[in-house]
Each structure stands twice: as C-alpha cells, then as structure tokens.
Image (tube, helix red, strand yellow):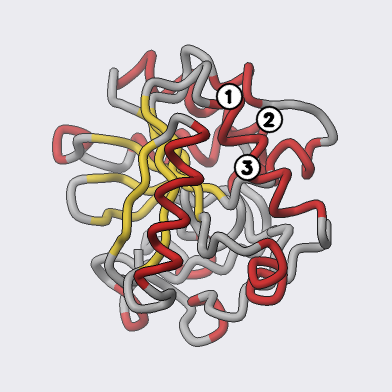
Amino acid sequence: MARLKAETIVYPVHKGLYVNLTNRCSCACTFCIRNSASGVGEDGEGGNNVLWLEHEPSFEEVMAAFDAEDMSRYEEVVFCGYGEPTCAFEMLKRVAVEVKKRYGLPIRVNTNGQGSLICGRDIAPEFEGIVDAVSISLNTPNAEEYQRIVRSRFGEAAFQGMLDFAREVKNYVPSVTMTTVETTITHEEEAVCQKICDELGVTYRIRAWVNS
C-alpha cells in the first residue's frame, strides 16, 4: 500500500534519515519553507515527502516507518520535520532511545533552541546519552531582529531562552552547533555570531540555503 503523502514520518536527505514528529512550532518564521512548499528532501514537492501531518504519529507508527526503511543506507538520524521537534519532546526522547538500541546510529536534533521555553523546564539534561548532536538556528545576533523574523510566541524571551539552551545543552551533548544562513546577514553580523558562539562554547556554522 502506498504511503499517504500527508503522513510522511521519515524521509531521506543525503545520508541522513529525517524524522517528522509534529507540525507544531513556537515560531512563525518569515523565511520558513512551510510558507512556500509542502515538502522537502529527495522527493520534494512532487514526491512522497509532503510533511504536513494529519495527526502526530504514535510511537508505534514512528517505529513502523523506520522498519520500512533500509537503515544501512543512513549515517545518522535527524529529528527535523515541518515543526519544532521539541514540541513533541517526550516522543522525541522515546524514539531516540529506541533508534539507538535498534540501529546504533548517531542522533541529531535540529531545533530553534526554544525547547526549554516550550516545555516549561530546562530540558538540556534530558538530551544526555540519547542525542549526539544539536543544531540550533541562531539566525541573527540581534535580539530585536531575531523576534522580528522568527515571530516566536515567547516574544522578547525567545532570543535569550535560545542562548541559555545552547549554553546548557553543550554540557550534555558532544556536538552543539549554532547556524545562520549565508547571504541573509552581513559579514559584520556573522562576526558577532561567531563571538556569541565562542562565548557559549559551541560551534558556529554558516550554512547554505537549502530545503533541508
């Protein structure tokens, strides 16, 4: 039976298998791909990777999606779909533990860094032992500009909350990276982002604009 487009739970991007747990997000980013496309990945707009979910998948549904894949193709598993993965944090943790047990693959979480605000507690310690890498969207070094473009429901608290999460999670996860997208900010702003990351003790990466 063909997989329903609206229920794409896992999808390949390069050598990673990406996991789409939720469409919920604490932000309404001006640049979000959800504003212009219904899917990403190898199949993209015209294929099976349409990521709008009709319902958030159960644990059994998520693991069935993994079972349908040839996991030998992949070098990592990445929690990154059409929503903020920490909006489904309890499910994320449960799936990450099972994926490590079954497949032994590294786990990465791509996040807006607002997970502790979303969950109402410091979630950084809960990453220990189940997540190998975290990539946080820094976007800009300026708090006011950050809120203008990400439009977080947490308002002015969002930027500092994201920085606090980065500072904390590096104590529990081997690799923490903060990213901006090339051409979207000035080189001077990139230098400030580098300084922020240096002070936090995390890696700074300028990434290309891609639909993944």
81 is higher (above) or lower (below) than 186: above
Q: Which mark is drawn over residue 90? A: 2
Residue 90 x/y as whole percent: 68, 30
Tell me the mark number nearer the camera, choosing from 2 and 3: 3
Identify the residue at horizontal 46%, vertical 42% (top origin): 197
> Which one is nearer the viewer's eye here, 197 or 106?
197
Check disc 1: other Cα within 10 Å, few if <14, some if 14-19, many if 20+.
few
User: What number is the disc on residue 163?
Assistant: 3
Q: Which residue is mark 1?
A: 94
Determine which of the numbered discs, if any, sits on residue 189 in the image.
none
Label 3 vs label 1: CA separation?
25 Å
Asked if marks 2 and 3 touch (Cβ < 8 Å), the reply is no
Which amino acid type corresponds to the residue marked 3 in the rendered image? Answer: Leu
Helix, strand or loop at label 2? It is helix
**Residue located 28% across and 54% down the image:** 12
Residue 55, image x and y in percent? Answer: 68, 57
Which of the 4 quarters of the picture holds residue 64? Answer: top left
Q: Residue at x 64, y 75 (%)?
A: 149
Q: For mark 2, does the 10 Å Cα neighbourhood hold few (<14), some (14 to 19), or many (20 or more) residues?
A: few
Quick one: label 3, few (<14), some, or many (20+) residues within 10 Å? some
Query: Is the C-beta separation of discs 3 and 1 under 8 Å?
Result: no
Q: Nearer the viewer, residue 158 or 34?
A: 158
Label 3 SS: helix
Specify the farthest residue to the left.
73
Residue 94 to residue 42: above or below: above
- Measured Cα–Cα span from mark 2 to mark 1: 6 Å
Q: Earlier in the sequence, mark 3 or mark 1?
A: 1
Q: Earlier in the sequence, mark 2 or mark 3?
A: 2
Percent across and percent down for residue 21 are 57, 48
